[in-house]
Image (cartoon, rainbow, N blue to C red):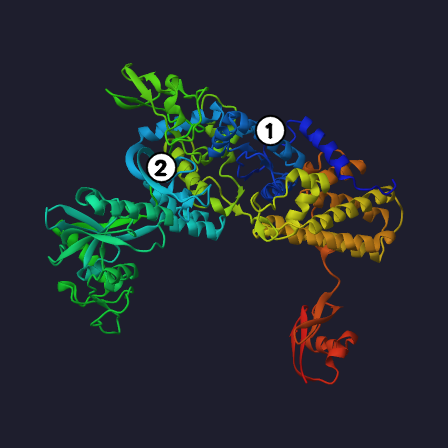
Amino acid sequence: MPEQTYDHKLIETKWSERWAADGKLFAPEENSSKPKYYVLEMLPYPSGALHIGHIRNYSIGDALARYKWMRGFNVLHPMGWDAFGLPAENAAIKNNRHPREWTNYNIEQMKRQHRRMGFSYDWDREVSTCEPEYYKWNQWFFIRMFEKGLAYRKQALLNWCPLCATVLANEQVVNGCCWRHEDTPVEQKELTQWFVKITAYAGELLQDIQNLEGGWPERVLAMQTNWIGRSEGTEVDFTLAETGEKVRVFTTRVDTIFGATCVILAPEHELVKRYVHGERAAQVKAMIDARAQQGPGDVDKTGLFTGLYAVNPYNGEKVPVWVGNFVLTGYGTGAIMAVPAHDERDFEFCTKYGIPIRPVVRPVDGELPAVATEAFGDYGVVENSGEWSGLASAEARQRMSAHAAAKGFGEAAITFRIKDWGISRQRYWGTPIPMVHCTACGVVPVPDSELPVLLPGGVAFTGSGQSPLAAAAGFVNTPCPKCGAPAKRETDTMDTFVDSSWYFYRYCDSKNSSAPFDSAKIAYWFPIDQYIGGVEHAILHLIYSRFWTKMMRDIGIITNDEPAARLFTQGMVIKDGAKMSKSKGNVVSADAMMDEFGADTGRLFELFAAPPERDLDWTTDGAMGAYRFIGRVFRFVTRNIDRLDASGEPGEADRKVLRKLHQTIQKITTDFENRWHFNTSIAAFMELVNELYACEAALCGATLREVLEKIVLLLAPFTPFVCEELWELMGRTGPVFKQPWPVYDPELAREDGAEVVLQVNGKLRSKLTVPFGTAREELERIALADEKMQPFLEGKSVAKIIVVPDKLVNIVVKG
């Protein structure tokens, strides 16, 4: 066969059509005896079109799926659509186009692009979360949680995005702004909302992080640990001097309570609502809104005096009660005792407002200062603290907590930073909350037999704060499921993170109409072996999905504790030094890339240009280099196909090529199994191709047969289109990804000798190959005599020689 030119459009069109025609090509085997492997990339939101930033995530997962098939695994590799959400409804408002129409059009466009990229998805398992067949089970889960007390309704100050006109969960507030609108400050709005009691699982979510160590990135686990935020301390009841009411504070340092000089309440605290009125109430409201915009982190501390005083139960001292914007209502009790001498935040606040500062803990080897000029936050020795004076802080904490419990004014306590998940949204395009409000019966769940509660048609989209469903009389008005009297449906819809909290379970049984899934199928496929997605989901989707798994376990439909055994977070694809965005004008569409270079080129470049966990800078020159390399492989294979039966005995060139081939097999296999450094895998493959070109004419037929087969198999996970074409041109049958992965031969991979690097003052100057185990003295002699080293040694004195046997000789010179 004469050498052929690489035509990516012809090849990729041909194989895309063939793969699409075989609906079972990428389906896992039923009742398989093979080991299972569930690999999954996070499902996308159907925003309209893929760009090259999206492709990286899918290319990583697809390469892994194909490799695992070739290693003999029964692979599940599905795809679906996170299809509910605000963008679709906003588009409906803007363009007078129904969200379903907008969403389904985008899904078709993105699915076409996925197919064009050649990703190996089992499309028969496709899930779209906006379909009743899916969101019926969101409603079913909600009712189960309601029955267990995990779903409840309360009035609360909540994060409100004025642009989205809806409530945001705490995790959806980023730097004080909406997570979808990065320049829109979040406000606080008091509404009656539905919450999911994720705090009931806070301890388990935190404890089980240890079971994910080694499988999940340390960064993600650290972010989750911080977000859950476990604190051990003491709850203590101060008493309002004016009314006798109790004010319970939470402190992690009860050993400092004799240094408490005021009590500070969160702006949302019930006592503030009860006793702060008029102009000061307006100041509190301004505090709340300002903090919502700044976020709950490092805010500029402001406060106001309530006019009230509270009595410290340990010493009977009356201290003023303040409101402070840095105290969080959802952390602890929403009230703290301020000990400015031993807490930096308290020191800053009390210094600003002239509140006394009283040291009561000294360093172990130091004195108690007469005047505190800064906060001493370490443990030490307690002083001026009654019967506990002279105790070490740790012992004082234990004894003082026990004293509070014995006297009935407090107790040791554990609190968490994480808050319950507010899931109510005042929008249309989401899962209807399956509850009915009856004046006689209260809040009543819709019976399971009446699920799903369907989204109605003919709804007007205004973007106002009230849910569009509230104006749909045919939807709202319904008989009470319990007494039959006229009642009204809940008009809020669920946060879309509900949809993505369990979708990967539905993939295992996506056509089931009688249950969310068959538990036996979940037992086979779960946990997910490898989950792939962005680190930006660390405290959103990834915490919610862990909670949802534990909730499903506790209602008895699964047995696993965690959704995914391993998680990988890929870096971003950037262009011109910045994240891709329409506003920056640096978005490269997937279609444009495939038209110019082909899907294989896009995949190869994004896997080669950087380690997968790091950001990657897309360049046209880099893509062109990948394209040329694929063409180089294609030409080598096609022009040598006719030589596969050529006679001849293997010579030195054959041994050299086979050594490089088996070293490359070993390298790529190791990278897949361990580090996922696909960039170094592809670099090793490029070195192999260079070796093939250098030795091509001298290779015998037997060597070419082995080489051509194995290079196609090695490259197949990265560039499936061209490899499928070459496999067919070589006369082979069956999909490449179903062929056995090449196995390296350690004997063939072994070098004849050790390659030793020669350096002068740490800089590479030469290389040489020596027998393994060559003595240090001999290595020194060879290095000093090496011809390439002479220009760097002449006229200089040797200070010392560093030898690493079989690796390196570094000659340190002076002069």
Classify residue 133 as left or right of residue 580.
Answer: left
Classify residue 509 as left or right of residue 595.
Answer: left
Give whichever of 21, 555 is nearer the camera.
21
- Residue 227 percent location from the top left of the image: 38, 48
Please, what is the three-letter code of the amino acid marked with disc 2? Gly
Give whichever of 759, 328 is nearer the camera.
328
Quadrant of residue 61 in the image? top right
Residue 108 bears which disc, if any?
Answer: 1
Q: Earlier in the sequence, mark 1 or mark 2?
A: 1
Q: Quadrant of the N terminus?
A: top right
Please tell me how crowded label 1 is: few (under 14), some (14-19), or many (20+) other residues with Cα within 10 Å. some
Whole-number angstrom distance, CA of label 1 to CA of label 2: 32 Å
Outermost residue toward the top in this view: 484
Position of 485 relative to 97 (above/below): above
Give whichever of 128, 735 is nearer the camera.
128
Please tell me how crowded label 2 is: few (under 14), some (14-19), or many (20+) other residues with Cα within 10 Å. many
Quadrant of residue 652 in the image? bottom right
Residue at 21% across, 50% down: 249
Residue at 33% across, 37% down: 197
- Residue 242 percent location from the top left of the image: 10, 49
Quadrant of residue 556 in the image? top left
Residue at 71% across, 75% down: 779
Q: Is residue 53 visible?
A: yes
- Residue 18 percent location from the top left of the image: 71, 29
Residue at 64% across, 36% down: 119
Q: Quadrant of the C terminus?
A: bottom right
Classify residue 171 as left or right of residue 521.
Answer: left
Outermost residue toward the right in this view: 647
Q: Which residue is mark 2?
A: 422
